[in-house]
Amino acid sequence: MYVADLVKRSGRSIKSAKIRTLLTAMAIGVGTFALTLTMAASNGATNYVNGVIADNFDPAELIVTNDEAVLGQANTTTPREYDDSFSTGSSNAGATTQVKYLTERDVKKIENMDGVEYVRRDITVNARYITGPNDKRYVATIQTFSPAQQPSLAAGSIENQLQGNQIILPEAYVSVLGFESAERAIGQKIAVTVQQSVDTAALQKQLQSGQLTADKLAELSQNTTHTESFTIAAVQHAPTTVQPGTELYLYANESDVRALNDIMTRGTDNYQKYAYVFVRVKGGEDE
């Protein structure tokens, strides 16, 4: 059969079944459009995840933990023998559980390993409240600032690492704390107030010796707070590539956040214990 005959037969077929031809063409068009949308959504999701990783994580760092339970992989049906590294944690389902945390002794051992450049404690502190020039109180969460983070700044600047008692303030806090603008906030101070833990064992000894009354003990247990002053080094734009739920985090250097965490946990099972740490491997960025 010649090509000319094939063309003629195709033409007659199209003319005799116009509705079928139209429906077939529409189906092809819809399928192509759906495939394009799927590929675009897939590429968009991939780019978003890559952006979150690039802006918040160091590819040369490893996440090191002391317990599979931190990663949700522990056997929760078998009793576990106690040691002093256990502390309260949560399972992936949100249930309260006992987790074997890393202690300062563990951190020192990791720091002394060959090939380790440094160990970074990733600490998050829930402040009781923060205040600015207008003295209004707002809840806030403060986290250690990672050198790998690349925040988009509305004002100010960040060197390789934040200095002592410097803080990065989210743009959403600028006006509510009483600052005229992001630029005017730079170099100004905010006060961070945390709940100070009470060493109940020491207080009980004082109570038994008659140095402390039961009423005074109750008052100290409820009203003990600590306030620290921080200078605003930078104001961060509302981020677009962060882990969900961290959009309003404030950031300070590790030693400052660690000091706040120690104040909040001293005398408790969580004192100087960490669910995980970040370990930077020498030359790891080249792997």
Image (cartoon, helix red, strand yellow):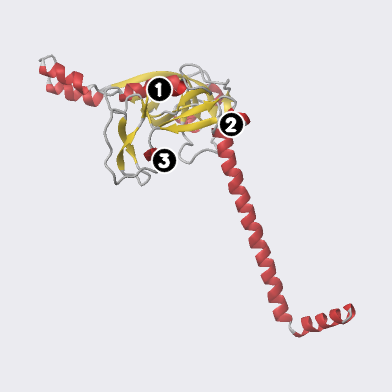
Mark 1 — residue? 258
**Distance Cα–Cα, label 3 vs label 1:** 23 Å
Question: In x, y percent, where is residue 117?
Answer: 53, 22
Q: Amino acid at mark 3?
A: Leu
Looking at the image, residue 197 sits to the left or right of residue 244; the answer is left
Q: How many marks?
A: 3
Residue at coordinates 17% horizontally, 25% vertically from top-left? 218
Looking at the image, residue 140 sits to the left or right of residue 117; the answer is left
Q: Earlier in the sequence, mark 2 or mark 3?
A: 3
Question: In x, y percent, where is residue 136?
Answer: 38, 27
Q: What's the mark number on residue 152?
A: 2
User: Which of the 4 image quadrants contains residue 266?
Assistant: top left
Q: Residues within 10 Å of mark 2 (few under 14, many from 20)?
A: some
Q: Residues within 10 Å of mark 1 (few under 14, many from 20)?
A: many
**Distance Cα–Cα, label 2 vs label 3:** 30 Å
Residue at coordinates 15% horizontally, 16% vertically from top-left? 206
Q: Is residue 7 visible?
A: yes
Looking at the image, residue 212 sits to the left or right of residue 188; the answer is left
Q: Amino acid at mark 1?
A: Arg
Question: In x, y percent, where is residue 92?
Answer: 38, 44
The furthest residue to the front = 114
Mark 3 — residue? 71
Q: Amino acid at mark 2?
A: Ser
Helix, strand or loop for disc 2: loop
